[in-house]
Amino acid sequence: MATTAARETARVVDAGTYRVTIGAGLRHELGNLVAAAARAHHYAIVTDDGVAPHYAPAAQADLKRHGRTSVHRMPAGETHKTRDTWIRLTDDLLAAGCGRDTTVVALGGGVVGDVAGFVAATFMRGVPVVQCPTSLLAMIDASVGGKTGVDTAAGKNLVGAFHPPSAVLVDVDTLRTLPDAHRRAGLAEAIKHGAIADATYFTRVETLLPAVLAADAPATIELVARSVEIKAAVVRADERESGLRKTLNFGHTLGHALEQASGYALLHGEAVAIGMVLEARLAERLGVAERGTAAEIERVVRIAGLPSAVPGNLSPAAILDATRHDKKARAGAVAFALPAGIGTMAGAERDWAIEVGDALVLEVLS
């Protein structure tokens, strides 16, 4: 069981309307922590087939001390982040007797968090959700900010809603059951946070890499806490992504297109790692970034064990076409969040979104 000492070593980040608590062993106090943040008559745990065997039984037993509970499982993986899954989960909640007095508990990685958050945003016109991320990517990025949604055949996250959680509870010990490739994929978002907002943190991420990959708790708590601080500050300034929040999309315009073009064979973090390198090259060729920015990002990406180049089996034309369906596109034009250097972004005078011509995008992709 988690101890008072374990709670005292946790880091708490103010995300505006909710708090992000980051520690080791927090899952052993899940019931108390969830109930304190969003007390309910019924707690509906949404998880997936990969996470459920590890953590769902204990979570359900702990939450039963505070009210009725039910567990709702979905298949693991991005290919199941769909409207069909959303339909089935909402039907499952209704069949379990969930009503307006329900709190959804999202127990899993970024896919579970996005889908469960969308279920919570739309079920009974909106019920609370507590995010309990179990992957590094979800801890660092996906669980924070209130974006929820599902993918469609046309692209990622095209159907969704802004629905901030009541709390985010990060137990870094859950990373011990996470495959190595997924730990590395999560590091892409930490690299991104340093690249867009904090050059000192960018350097610190490189230093912390070995310990985080070994699931060292203090190192992971430090990494997650600083990334959450950066993202939370941006989101508080621009909750609905009309300006500054667009900077968080660095690496994601091409990253999402790479994911889609690969049929989601690339993990999200792997695609974002490639996207950051390519988009930094775009920035240098446009003259908005300092020379060497792309090379420095690529160097750290490679140290993290992440890919930095477009896989040879993907067509540049197909990737470019996928960017047109990105939710950031406007009037058919694709805009990018581009760096000015490590720790700073370009394009403030253009609401942090810079349109890039197809020819230059294809040149970089090739």
Image (cartoon, grey):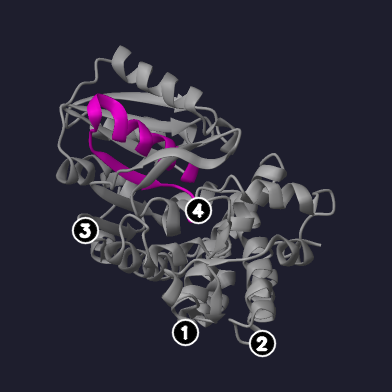
Please tell me which of labels 1 and 3 falls first in the chain. 3
Please tell me which of labels 3 and 4 falls first in the chain. 3
Name the residue tied to disc 4.
328
Q: Which residue is nearer to you in this view: 92 or 281?
A: 281
Residue 67 higher or lower than 252, as above or below: above
Please tell me which of labels 2 and 3 falls first in the chain. 3
Whole-Å distance between the Cαs marked 1 and 4?
29 Å
- Residue 340: percent from the left, percent from the top? 54, 81
Dot 3 surroundings within 10 Å: few (below 14), some, or many (20 or more)? few
- Count of numbered circles on the image: 4
Identity, as a three-letter code, of the amino acid under mark 2: Arg
Identity, as a three-letter code, of the amino acid under mark 3: Thr
- Residue 121: percent from the left, percent from the top? 30, 35
The span shown in magenta is 110-137
Please tell me which of labels 1 and 2 falls first in the chain. 1
Whole-Å distance between the Cαs marked 1 and 3?
32 Å
- Residue 324: percent from the left, percent from the top? 61, 48
Marks 1,3: beta carbons within 8 A: no
Which marked residue is nearer to the observer: mark 2 or mark 3?
A: 2
Q: Residue furthest right?
A: 312
Marks 3,4: beta carbons within 8 A: no
